[in-house]
Image (cartoon, rainbow, N blue to C red):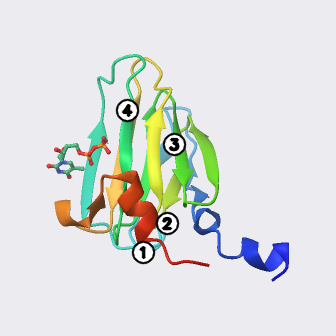
């Protein structure tokens, strides 16, 4: 198999930044998100991280089926994506785009600025059985290429 062909199996390539609509106005900007239109799934859940102390790390898990869309609503932070073969660090710092994270991606979030707010839209309700919280278990569950 050529190097190029092998690259197609990198799941991190399915994760991507998605621009959101932005209505500019002298009174302030407005951005909206419609499930199935601006994000590639119907939105079933919203949660947010805030009051994150300096140096804290969040994430440290992967999901079997859950799809998520992550937005820096205020401040900034990094999301490190890992598909078991490749890692990508994404820096989020604007509320008019977000990061789509597909299933079977180990993610870690760090480098939170003071006052950062991380909004996450999810394709499903919270389900602990959808998590891999152990990195070795996640790696073992990946399809071998
Ligand atoms: P977790 O998903 O591990 O957070 P993070 O990825 O930001 O580190 O969740 C932290 C805790 O919150 C864990 O005990 C599960 C709980 N939780 C819910 O009860 N409902 C939810 O929707 C989420 C996302 C987490």
Is residue 111 at all visible to an observer of this figure?
yes
73 horizontally vs 44: left or right: right
Indicate which disc, 1 or 3, sits on the residue closer to the N terminus: 1
Instruction: Identify the residue position indicated by label 4 in the image.
Output: 117
* Residue 44: image location, x then y, percent: 25, 66
As drawn, the label of residue 38 is 2
Quarter of the image for the N terminus: give it: bottom right
* Vertical side of 131 occupied by 4: above or below: below
Say if mark 4 contacts mark 2, CB within 8 Å.
no
The number of discs equals 4
Which tag is nearer the camera, tag 4 or tag 2? 4
Q: Which of 94 and 134 is in front in this view?
A: 134
Among numbered discs 1 and 4, the one appearing first in the sequence: 1
Asked if labels 3 and 1 touch by Cβ distance under 8 angstroms, the answer is no
State the image coordinates of residue 143 (x, y, percent, origin top left): 50, 78
- Would you name the residue on which mark 1 appears? 36
């Amino acid at each position: 198999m050529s190097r190029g062909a092998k690259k197609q199996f990198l799941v991190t390539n399915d994760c991507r930044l998605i621009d959101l609509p932005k209505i500019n106005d002298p009174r302030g900007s407005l951005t909206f998100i419609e499930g199935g239109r601006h994000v590639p799934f119907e939105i079933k859940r919203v949660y947010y991280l805030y009051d994150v102390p300096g140096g804290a790390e969040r994430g440290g898990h992967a999901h079997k089926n859950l799809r998520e869309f992550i937005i820096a609503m205020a401040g900034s932070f990094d999301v490190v994506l890992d598909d078991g073969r490749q890692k990508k660090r994404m820096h989020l710092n604007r509320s008019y785009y977000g990061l789509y994270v597909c299933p079977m991606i180990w993610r870690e979030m760090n480098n939170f600025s003071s006052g950062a707010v991380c909004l996450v839209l999810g394709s499903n309700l919270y389900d602990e059985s959808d998590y891999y919280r152990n990195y070795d278990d996640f790696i073992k569950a990946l399809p071998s290429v």
